[in-house]
Image (cartoon, grey):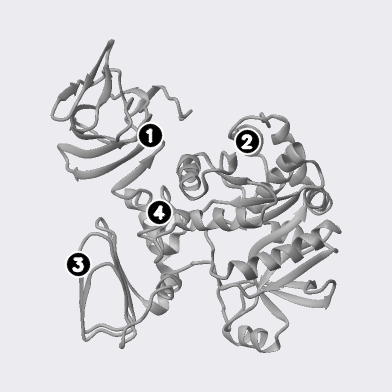
Amino acid sequence: MLIPVILSGGAGTRLWPVSRKAHPKPFMRLADGQTLAASTIRRALAVADAPETLTVTGRDYFFLTRDEYQQAAGEAHHHFLLEPEGRNTAPAIAAAALWAEHHFGPEACLLVLPADHLIRDTEAFAEAVDEARRLAADGWLTCLGITPTHAETGYGYIRAGESVSESGRRIEAFVEKPDLDTARRYYESGEYLWNGGMFCFRADAILKAIGELAPDILEQVRATWAATDADASPVELDPEAFSAVRPESIDFAVMEKASQRAVVPVDCGWSDIGSWQAISDLYETDALGNRVQGEAVLVDTRNTFVQGERRLVAAVGVENLVIVDTGDAVLVASRDRAQEVKAVVEELTRSDHDLAVHHRTVHRPWGSYTVLEDADDCKVKRLVVRPGGVLSLQRHQYRSEHWTVVGGLAKIRVGDEEFTLGAGETVRIPVGSVHRLENPGEDDVEIIEVQTGSYFGEDDIERLEDVYGRA
C-alpha cells in the first residue's frame, strides 16, 4: 500500500513578509489561487492506493492544515502526526514509518513529499512515482531526482549511475549546493539531478536503514513512540521523549550512506518556491519584463516584480526589484539578492518583533482575527468565528474587553452568566473576568473587540478550558 507522507514544517523565511512563522509557506496562495498545501494534498491523493495520507507537522499548524485539506480534498482520511518541536527530516520520517508499520504493516510503502513544493506536470510526477514504488517494493531506498533546466547553485544534486530498472538509476553520490562553475559542469554532463527532497521506500526498509546508519535516532524515536498514544487522532508525539532525539536530515543520516539507493529522474515542472525570484517566475511578463500580482502602476520600470495585497503599489524609474506589500509590511529587494530576505527575518527575530511571526490576520482553530488598530492605550480586532467555533474559556490580567456583534448570533459567557447577542448588541468583559465566546449557528459570527488596559500581548491569556487542546 502506498501512503503519502507530507512533511510540513519551517517558516519559509525567504518569502517574508507573506510567509511568517505563524502562517508559513505551505499556506501561501499562488497565482492560481491555490495554497501549496492544497495542491500537495491533491497531488498526493492522486497517486495513493487509498484515500489515506499522513502529515507530519507541529501542533501550531495542525488546525490550519486540517482546514486546508478539508477544503481541497474533504473525502479523504487525513491523518496527522504532531511533533512538539522540529527535529529535521530523519526523526520525522522514522516516526512516520513507525506509524505506517503500526496501522498498515511493515511492507507499507511511504511516499515522502514536502508540503511546500510546486509541480506543474502531475502526469509525469505520477509516472515517476509508479517507478519509484516498484523499486521500493524490492527494497530500494528511492528518490525522485529533478531533471535540471539550468545551472542552479541553490539546490543540492544527486549523481546518477548505472540503470537498475526501466528508468531508475543507482545513486552514486549526493552533492551539496555547488558554486556556479561547478553547477554548469553538472548541468552539461547530464549525470546530475536536483535533489527535490522526495523519497519512496517501504516502512521496514527505512527503519532498518536508520537503525544501521543512525541507530541513536531510531532508538530515541522508538522510545518516543512507546510513550505516545499511537491510536489517537491526531497522534501527538511525547514531548519529553522527542526532545531527546538528535536532529538530522534523512539525507545526512541515511541516504548519503545507504548501499541500496536509487533515483528516478523526473521532468515535472518542479519548483521549491524558495525565493521571491521563484514566485515571480510563475507570472506572465509585460513588454519590459515586469510581473505584477495585485494593483500596480509602473512608470519607466523594468524587470521588476510587484505583489500588493491591499493597496495600489506605484514604482517609477526602477529596475530589477522585488516589491511586496502585505498591508502591515513592505519588502523592497534587488532581484539578484532575493535569497537574502531571510536576513530581515533574523533581524526581526533578534528584536522580538511580532511581524516575524504574525500577519494582521491571525488564524485560529475557531476562525481568525484581524488587528485593526494597535496603539499604546487600546487594541482593536475583528474576530470571525466559524459555525461551531468555540474560543477558550479564559481570563486576562492586564486588559478588559468590549465586544460588539456585527454579524451572526453569538453565545457568550461572562463569569457565571451565559447569554446570546445578535448584531448591534454589546458586552463588556472586565479585567480578570472568566469569559468565552461560541458560535452555535450556521453562519459566521463577526465581532469587533476593543481592548483597553496596560498590556495587550497574546500571552495575557490564561486558558482554563479549551476544546482544541491548546495550553
Alpha carbons under labels 3 and 2: distance apart = 45 Å
Q: Residue at x 49, y 67 (%)?
A: 274
Residue 216 picture location, percent across and down: 77, 45
Numbered circles on residues, count: 4
Q: Does residue 266 appear left or right of residue 180 in this picture?
A: right
Q: According to the image, label 2 marks what residue?
A: 237
Badge 3, how many Cα within 10 Å: few under 14, some, many 20+? Answer: few
Residue type indicated by callout 4:
Arg
Labels 2 and 4: the sequence-earlier one:
4
Residue 14 picture location, percent across and down: 44, 64
Q: Are marks 3 and 2 in contact (CB under 8 Å)?
A: no
Q: Are marks 3 and 1 in contact (CB under 8 Å)?
A: no
Name the secondary structure under disc 2. loop
Labels 1 and 4: the sequence-earlier one:
4
Name the secondary structure under disc 1. loop
Q: Which image quarter: residue 249?
A: bottom right
Alpha carbons under labels 2 and 4: distance apart = 24 Å
Residue 312, disc = 3
Q: According to the image, label 4 marks what residue?
A: 20
Badge 1, how many Cα within 10 Å: few under 14, some, many 20+? Answer: many
Q: According to the image, label 1 marks what residue?
A: 366
Residue type indicated by callout 1:
Trp
State the residue in front, 40 or 471.
40
Question: Is residue 220 visible to us here?
Answer: no
Q: Residue at x 76, y 66 (%)?
A: 131
Badge 4, how many Cα within 10 Å: few under 14, some, many 20+? Answer: many
Alpha carbons under labels 3 and 1: distance apart = 32 Å
Q: Nearer the viewer, mark 2 or mark 1?
A: 1
Residue type indicated by callout 2:
Leu
Labels 3 and 2: the sequence-earlier one:
2
Q: Does residue 424 appear left or right of residue 39 in this picture?
A: left
